[in-house]
Image: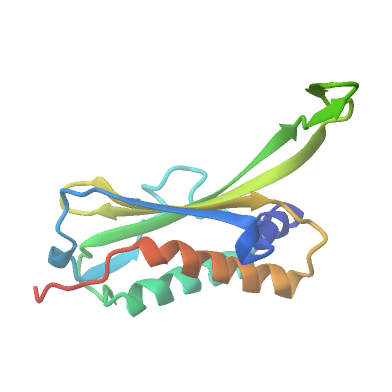
Amino acid sequence: MRFALALLALVAACSQFAVRGERDPDVDFGSFRTFAWLPLDIAPPVDQQVPDRYIGRKIVQAIDEQLTQKGYVAAAGTPPDLYVTYRLIQASTTNVPLSYARGYWGLHASPDTYDEGTLVIDVIAVKTNTLVWRGTASARLLPTLPFDKAVERAQDAIAHTFKTFPPRTGTS
């Protein structure tokens, strides 16, 4: 659970996380209408896996809300046009700052090591089984952030990430 909380804390503040969204420019998003979550039996083992079910549900709900706001509909009993999945990645980062002393620049004696977390959201076209959009939100982890604030800020990171997701414009 601590890992999941730390990863959710990656969204400590809007100005403190990097958001990126990339889409396949050759894909007509107007042809997509419905979405569903990538079934776990065909998802990579690390996808949609968090130690805390509550956190997992909050991530799914936030992504569902963003897709709905963009005009997509959750598939109900029919095959979806799009599959959605996410994964959480944690990595240690070492920043060795430069300092100025005695007329020259040099490496600072004490490097700053910290954990960085990334939430990756993938959207896959079902018919072609190809990745059509990937959004990421990355930041330094703050494991001391209160649980409710971590969840709130994760939802905020997801909302910022989906600003790059194409709205549904087609009529199919």
- Quarter containing the N terminus: bottom right
Q: How many marks?
A: 0
Residue 134 sits above or below residue 64 on the image: above
Q: Position of residue 36 (x, y in %)?
A: 32, 66
Left or right: residue 39 versus residue 140 is left
Q: Residue at x 15, y 48 (%)?
A: 26
Rendered location of residue 97, percent (x, y): 77, 32
Q: Nearer the viewer, residue 147 or 170?
A: 170
- Residue 14 location, quadrant: bottom right
Quarter residue 50 falls in: bottom right
The residue that appears at 22% across and 72% down in the rendered structure is: 168
x and y percentages locating residue 44 in the rendered image:
43, 43
Say which of 122 and 45 sits in front.
122
Q: Position of residue 85 (x, y in %)?
A: 41, 55
Residue 134 relative to residue 105: left or right: left
In this view, the residue in front, 17 or 79, is 17
In percent of the image, x 33 and y 63: which residue is there?
165
Q: Is residue 167 above or below residue 134?
A: below
Left or right for 161, reference 17: left
Q: Quadrant of the C terminus?
A: bottom left
Residue shown at 35%/72% (left/top)? 67
Q: Residue furthest front?
A: 103
Q: Is residue 60 visible?
A: no
Q: Is residue 87 visible?
A: yes
